[in-house]
Image: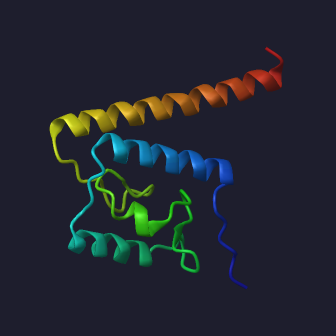
Amino acid sequence: MAEKKKLPSFVQMAKNFAGELTTYIASGAPNVEEENYKKRLDTCNKCEHLLKATMRCGKCGCLLEHKAKWKTTTCPLSKWDPEILSVEQKDSLEVIRKRSEQAKLDAAKKKDDSKTGE
């Protein structure tokens, strides 16, 4: 019997989407060309983590019809990369990613601290 694929938690999916959406909007809401959109979807369609019934990524939980269109997004497995329009956007994306990673680390530390009673 095939193992059932599971999405990340609702909270994690919301965080993932909010981060991607923030970056997309901060960059001026740029979309990829139709040809690249189709390539991204083709890559996703071949991925073992795709949840085909809902067209969601099983790793991040994002709806691929949106995520694959946005120039600023990347596959969580690095199967496709963002298309950045300018050096400023690339720098902005890197800052946003670093802040997001730091926030995750801070949240994990806070959770560990609360478990140990510190």
Q: Does residue 80 appear left or right of residue 4 in this picture?
A: left
> How many numbered badges does the structure rendering display?
0
Q: 89 or 76: nearer the eye?
A: 89
Residue in the image at 43% along x and 78% along y = 45
15 w.r.t. 2: above or below: above
Residue in the image at 51% along x and 74% along y = 55
Q: How is the image coloured?
A: rainbow
The N terminus lies in quadrant = bottom right
Q: Does residue 99 appear left or right of residue 26 in this picture?
A: right
Residue in the image at 40% along x and 36% along y = 97
The image quarter in which residue 10 lies: bottom right
Which percent across, then down, holds residue 74?
A: 37, 54
Q: 17 or 8: nearer the eye?
A: 17
In this rendering, does residue 46 appear at all? no
Which percent across, then down, holds residue 28?
A: 27, 45
Q: 15 or 98: nearer the eye?
A: 15
Which percent across, then down, holds residue 7?
A: 64, 62
Q: Does residue 66 appear left or right of residue 103 in this picture?
A: left
In this rendering, does residue 89 appear at all? yes
Q: Does residue 7 appear left or right of residue 100 in this picture?
A: right
Instruction: Give the residue at the far bottom of this rendering.
Output: 1
Which percent across, then down, holds residue 12?
A: 62, 48
The C terminus lies in quadrant = top right
109 w.r.t. 64: above or below: above
Instruction: Give the residue at the far left of this rendering.
Output: 86
The image quarter in which residue 115 lies: top right
